Amino acid sequence: MPQGLDAEKVPDSAVGSLLSVVVPVYNEKEVLEEFYDRTKRVLLDVNGLDHEIIFVDDGSCDGSAQVITQFVGQDARVRLLKLSRNFGHQIAITAGIDAACGNAVVVIDADLQDPPEVILRFIEKWKEGYDVVYGVRETRDGETLVKVWTASIFYRILKALVNLDIPVDAGDFRLMSRRVVEHLKAMQERDRFVRGLVSWIGFRQIGMMYRRDKRYAGETKYPYRKMIRFALDGITAFSSIPLKMATIMGYLTSLVAFAYACSVIVQKFMGYTVQGWATIMVGLLFLGGVQLICLGILGEYIGRIFNETKGRPLYIIDHEARSDRPRYSLPDRAASGSFSKD
């Protein structure tokens, strides 16, 4: 349990019967109208539970913020947090979670790959007493075989490396109870892997199988370069095994070098002439490659230590748009982000 937090002091009923839906947005103008319509229909079908939709504009440059502002003008349950620049998907999720007032919080992307209708199934499990209900992708329509294959490998490698039960084939599409949200807000590490943090918190968690649809419009915001970066964040945030692997590689390399040295000595005493140029070059390249790999692994961890010591805020909010008739009080976010203006 994070220091200074007592689960009994943040009961789920503390902020009333309110469901918060956090939607990170980055250049999704073509999708927003359809996403809002579908999500609104789903939320209006929930009996006895009010809702708010928090769109977090992560530095979009296609007019997404203007579209969301129109939603705010016509719906008092919609809020917009516009970040001062593009901070990244995981930080945008964090900003939305920090601002959420509900006793349950749903995280969902705006691209409609994760169907809003699944939220109703999440709520049913939450009412049964589960603190986290996460979506497990049964199929992934509209994605290339390479992306599906690499994602599958990543989840299984991550599960093998970390001493933590991070579910495979599960993204950030999930519902979290209020007490999970409070513990998550207390975790202010910079290189964030939200799904891993939620698994680390614990409590009762359950997966729900669903069919992931293809994007409604637009292009993916996770090219292979970002996917690799995201994978490194997930592995280094929850496992020190790569560091141990670097040590093992060093020992194995030394063992191979020692064995080779012994063979050279034996050949010398037996009168064999060792030509050696190609062998020496191969050996040097092999040793140099191992050393660079080990230095790279160390650099990844040192870089994360460097980021943690800076003490900068996770994000900066340019401005917030909400109805003039607020339906709920706003929480104090001073410890989680910074405002340039309100």
Image (spheres, grey):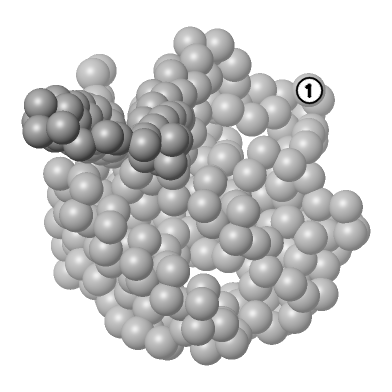
The amino acid beneath tag 1 is Ser
Left or right, 27 with respect to 190, comes to right
For disc 1, the marked residue is 340
Q: Image quadrant for the N terminus?
A: top left
Residue 41 in the image: above or below residue 289: below
Instruction: In this rendered view, identify the residue nearer to me: 49 or 119.
Output: 119
The x, y position of residue 66, in whole percent, is 88, 57
Residue 121 in the image: above or below residue 272: below
Residue 81 in the image: above or below residue 244: below
Q: Residue at x 38, y 78 (%)?
A: 137
Left or right, 150 with respect to 321, comes to left
Q: Quadrant of residue 254?
A: top left
Instruction: Say few, some or many: other residues with alpha carbon within 10 Å of mark 1 (under 14 / 14 to 19 / 20 or more).
Output: few
Instruction: In this rendered view, identify the residue nearer to me: 224 or 278.
Output: 278
Number of residue marks: 1
Residue 67 seen from this side: yes
